[in-house]
Every structure is written in C-alpha cells, then in structure tokens.
Amino acid sequence: MVALTLAIPLASGSGVRALAAFGGGTAVVNRLALVGAFFVVFIPASFSLVLALESFVGERERTTLEVLLSTPLREAEIYAGKVAAVLAVSLTLCYGGLLVYCLVTFPGLGYFPLAILLALALSTICQVAAMVAGAVIISLNARTMRAANVMASFIILPMSIALQAEAALILIGRAEYLWAFALLMLVVAVVFLRMGFNGFSREALLARDVGLRNPWRRAVNAVRGSFEGRPGLLRLVWMRRTPMLIAAAGFPIGAVAGYLAGATNVIPANVVRPVLTSLVRTTNASGAIDEALLIFSHNVLAFVLVAALAILTAGLSGFLLTFAPGFILGFAAALTSWTFALSGIVPNGFVEIPAAIIAGGLAIQIGAAAIHMDPSGGWTARVLAAFADYVRALRWLVPALAVASVLEVLLG
Amino acid sequence: MLEVDGLAKRYGEVLALRDLSVRVDEGECLVLLGRNGAGKTTALRCMAGVLLPSAGNVKVDGIDAADDPAAVRALVGLMPEVPGLYERMSARSYLDHFGAIYDLEPSLRTRRIGELLELFELADAGDRWLGTYSKGMRQKVALIRATLHRPRLVLADEPTSALDPDSARRAWNYLKDLQKDGCALVICTHSMEEAENLAGDIGIMSAGRALAVGSIVELRRRSGLKTHQEVRELPSLQDIYLAIVGNGAAEHELAETRSA
Ligand SMILES: Nc1ncnc2c1ncn2[C@@H]1O[C@H](COP(=O)(O)OP(=O)(O)O)[C@@H](O)[C@H]1O
Ligand SMILES: [Mg+2]
C-alpha cells in the first residue's frame, strides 16, 4: 500500500511534467495537474473502505472479537479507536501521496492552485470520514466478511457518484464549490458516525441471533408484521406531528425561498419557466381526461419516488415534496404577483397540499428511522414500520390526488 | 467475589440461560460442566460483563455488571473458548498490547510476560508471530493474556482442551497458585480430570439451567450412586456427572469397561 501511494503520485506527477515539457498547452497541463492530484488522493482513500469494512467483521471472522470486547475498554473507546485507526492510515497515505505529487509536479510549472488543493485536502478528509463511517456500520452489522463486501456496494455506488461530482468540481476549478462539497460530505460523515456509534454495543456484536433459518419467510413475515397494528390515518398524523410540521413548514419556506430567488434573479428564469407554465397552464377542454390523468400520474410518481428516496436522503425528499411546490409558487409570485400565482394552485391545492404534507411528514419519518440506530437493534423493523405507514397512508392520499387532478382540470 | 442471582440470557428467540444462581468466594473455584449448548459460554460472558443479563443480576466484588460493566470487566480476566489471537503479532507484543489496555506499568508487564512465557515454556517462541503457533501454544498465550493483569476473578472456557497432559497440569498448578493469591475462578470444561483437579464447587448445567451445584461429595450423595462393589472405588466424577445429566446407558458401559 505504501509502495502504491508513492508510485502513483510519482508516475502521474512525472506524466504531467513530461506533458508540460513536450509542449502541451498550458491550460491542458494545468487541468491535468489538478485531475492528477484528485486521483493521487482518491486511490489511497479507497483503501480506507477495505480497512473499515474489515474493522469489526474481520475481527469476528478471525475470532479475536470476543477478546477485544472482554477488555475494560468502553464502547465509545473501541468504536473511536477503530474509526481513528482506519482514518489515520488512509489519511496518512492520502496526504503523503498528495505531498509527493505536489513536490514532483508543481515546482517550476508556474502554476500552483493552493486554494483548490487545500479544498481538495479538506474534502478528502470529509469524504474518507463519510466512507469509513458508513463502512464501519456495515462491518458492525455484517456476520461475514463476504456479506460485508456485498453490502459495500451501498457505499461504493453513492460514493462513485460523489466522486464524479467532485471531479467535475475540480475541473471547474472553483474552490468554493469544493468547500461546499466538503461540507456536504461532513454532514454525511457526522450522520454515519452517529449512527454507527449509537448502534454499537457488545450486545449487538455478540448476542444478535445468527444463522437464521428461512430467510425468505422471515423477510415476508417481517414485512407483513410491519403492517400489523399500525394506527389509522388520523391517529398516525397525530403520532407523527413533528415530521408533519416540518413538512408543512416546507411549503412557506419554499415559497419565501422561491420568491427571493425570483426577485433576485439567482436562477435564470428560463430554467424555471417550463415548470411554471405547467403550473399555470390553461386547461384544454378536449383533452381534459388525458390531462387529469397526466397530472394524477405525475403526482403519484412524485409520492412514490419521495418514499423510495427517503432512506438515501435521510428524509430530505419528504421535505422537498412541499418545499419544491412552495418554491415554484414563490418564484412565480416574484415574476408575476402572489394573486396570480396563488390562483394557479386553487382549488386543487386545497387537496394536494395537505396530501403532500402528510406524505412528506411520513417520508421524513422514514428518513429519521433510517438514520437512527439503537444498541438493541430493530433498525429494519422500524424502517419497515415507517414504510408500512407510508403505504397505508397512500390508500387515502392517492384518491386525494385523483380528486385534486380532476379539480385542477375542471376548475383550475 | 462473584454473586450470580437468577441470571437469564436470551438471544433473540433462544433462551440460552435461565435462572442461574451461583456464588464464588475469593480463592474458590467453581467448575461448570454440561453438554454442548448448555449455556456455559453464555454464563461466562454474562459474568465477565461482556453481555448484559436479560434477567437477574451478576455482581463482581459488589459491583453490578448491569450498572458498571466496564468496572466489572476491569476486575475480570476472560479466557474465551477460542484463543482469538492476532496472528501477525508476536506473543510478547500481543501480551504487551493487552497489558497496556489493562493499564499495567510497562516495566511490570515486561517482567510478568517474561515470567509467564517462561512458565509455559514459550520463552523461546515469544518473538515469533502467533500465526505460527500450534493450537496448544495459542491456548497458553490466551491463558496468559486472561491472567496477566492479575484479575480478581478468572473466567476460563475450556482452558486446557488443547494442551498436552504435562502442560495441562502446569496450567492447573498455575490456576491453583492464582487461587491461593485470593483469585476466584470459574472454569467451564468437558475434562473430568480438570474438574476433579480444580473444583471446589461443581455446577452441572443442562439446557440453560443449573441441575445441581455443590462439592463433589454433595453431588455424589445427590446422584445416588453407590461405591462400585466390584472394584471398591468411589464413583468417579464422570459417573456422577452422567447420572445427574441422566444418561444411564452410558454410565453402565463405563462401569463395565472399568471393571473389565
Ligand atoms: N449469538 C448467538 N445467537 C443465538 N444463539 C446463540 C448465540 N450464542 C449461543 N447461542 C445458543 O445459546 C445456547 C447456549 O450456548 P453456549 O452458551 O455457547 O453453550 P455452551 O458453551 O454450554 O456449549 C445454544 O443453544 C446456542 O446455540
Ligand atoms: Mg461453550
């Protein structure tokens, strides 16, 4: 690993220099120098994933876990020790590589993007921390290393998307975007670290039953069980009043944000206009049924997507369900007037908005369940229950959306 | 030293341990016998403050394991069923690492590690990677690790199952020495010789329950076995054990082979 971290920056650094020496265009060389830095940092960062996946399930497979757990070390110390050890190794490799690369590449190149390199270094810490924290959660919950490797794709996929975004940001060459990226990764890392820490206990590692028979039947039973004994819609809305309130707040917050965005021209109007026209579109009597169906299917799709994305986005998608229409409304109001904008959502809004608030609140609940871990386990049961609530609520929400689409076409 | 009262432990749907009550004073040794899956390992983990009881309580030196498991773990030395060593460490550095976790002074731990490696005939191999050790050597290292910090209570799960008879005897003598220094012992084993050698009290477990707890003499009385007429010897612990566990057939066979 150490050899690789040295060889790669040496090779890529020399490559960039060679290109510069043999008359590559300055712009190309400069860009390439940055992309090289990105790779040099990224490759050791990916080692951290393997190390972190190993951390607990590896000790379990090598039967050293029980000894570690029998020491007086507290849960927090073991967890922090594991995370810190992985981070220390991989960050040392990252920064060692970056340093070697910079020493090889930049002297005499007449170009040294300090701000970007610093931002890259910071976003690397945050990204590696997020990856490590996520992998440690997998390592805590997997029973075998092989299972952990399979589950690692839940980290690799989102991370590869994040990396592509990061690469694009580096090519754009604006440090502030990288800072924002680092901040996002930091939030993810903190959420994961908290989850892992809360879910970490000796009990969870040693006493959770293993080798269950009939995994398929168990899964079916778990799903069926999650639907049993759930409250009716009204009681559910009361039980979930906090996420409902958050979702409800999304609408006015979105409206204000949209209004500000529209009034200050942050977003060019031509991006939002197509959406706006669909919002305030005049009805076309001949295709009324088609149009109602279109609006209806659109909204149902949005509700389904929001639930599906709730786990990945920690419930943010639920908030967006009310925030986005609010934003569009505010934006339209800024371009025209509040009266005109509001007239666009009457009367169907009276049905759609409460439906969106309920669905949004339940989606936020799914997200909250997804990022909550407990030493006594039960994560799956809680997430399934939150999903079951959502699905059961759809029995009311889907007809409501149908009514709203008819209202919109007939009276809107 | 160790007071266990009404201890139960549930793993999901499995009730691995139910209503176990035992007491071990300083300098005493309790030997737990029982078939595979009887709950011995689970009992040790609960006594070591590694797992929390589902019901009942465990007190070590007056500290309740549910209230302050870390303090209990600091007083206890647990030797699990499998040695669980880090293969890519030498015995010395491995033991030193754990000595440090238990807050032993560096000079003290170097001295103790040296003495104990010597005692268990590992001094020469002490700088080799543990991955190269034989099963018995690993078990010795695990025993040293569990007792390095001079715990007040040693919990050992089949501590000599892989040792040759000579090394096993050495290990028993070592455990008896610890006992003389006031350490309490709980040993799980399938070796009747080990049990007879170490035991003060013997607990016979089955399906998560203690069928009987007491000294060999008491258990002999409870088992109802008489002195073997033919050979005029006391019923062995093996006989007593099988009688209490309720395996009459095996007992007959054993008696026959002995008289033959
Ligand atoms: N992590 C676990 N999850 C589920 N069941 C377990 C677990 N560990 C042990 N058991 C069960 O608990 C019972 C007691 O096991 P154990 O204490 O290891 O027995 P022993 O050490 O006496 O052989 C057994 O039935 C075993 O299958
Ligand atoms: Mg066992």
Image (spheres, rainbow, N blue to C red):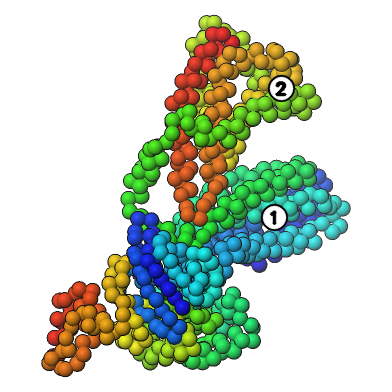
Query: Can I make out residue B17 in this image?
Result: no
Q: Classify residue B150 as left or right of residue A86.
A: left
Q: Residue furthest top?
A: A285
How many residues crowd mark 1 within 10 Å: few (<14), some (14–19), many (20+)?
many
Q: Which residue is found at the position 56% from the left and 8% from the top?
A: A411
Judged left or right of residue A142, residue A102 is right
Along the viewing direction, whichever of B23 and B255 lies nearer the viewer: B23
Residue found 27% across the figure and 72% down from its top: B211
Q: How many marks?
A: 2
Q: The residue under label 2 is which amino acid type?
A: Phe
Q: Chain of mark 1?
A: A
Q: Quadrant of residue B27?
A: bottom left
At which x and y percent is residue A185? 67, 48
**In front: label 1 or label 2:** 2
* Nearer to me, A81 or A385: A385
x and y, in percent, of residue B152 in the image: 50, 80
Q: Quadrant of residue B241?
A: bottom left
- The quadrant in which the N terminus of chain A is found is bottom right
- Give the SS element for disc 1: helix
Q: Which residue is mark 2?
A: A331
> Quick one: A190 or B197, which is closer to the camera?
B197
Name the quadrant of the C terminus of chain A. Answer: top right
Kind of element beneath mark 2:
helix
Q: Residue at x 20, y 78 (%)?
A: B243
Q: Residue A330 shows which numbered tag?
A: none
Q: Which mark is residue A125?
A: 1
Name the residue at the front extreme: B62
In the rendered image, residue A388, in percent from the top left (x then y), is placed at 44, 36
Where is residue A226, by image quadrant? top left
Hey, what amino acid is under mark 1? Ile
- Left or right of residue B209, residue A359 in this image: right
Label 1 with label 2: CB-CB less than 8 Å: no
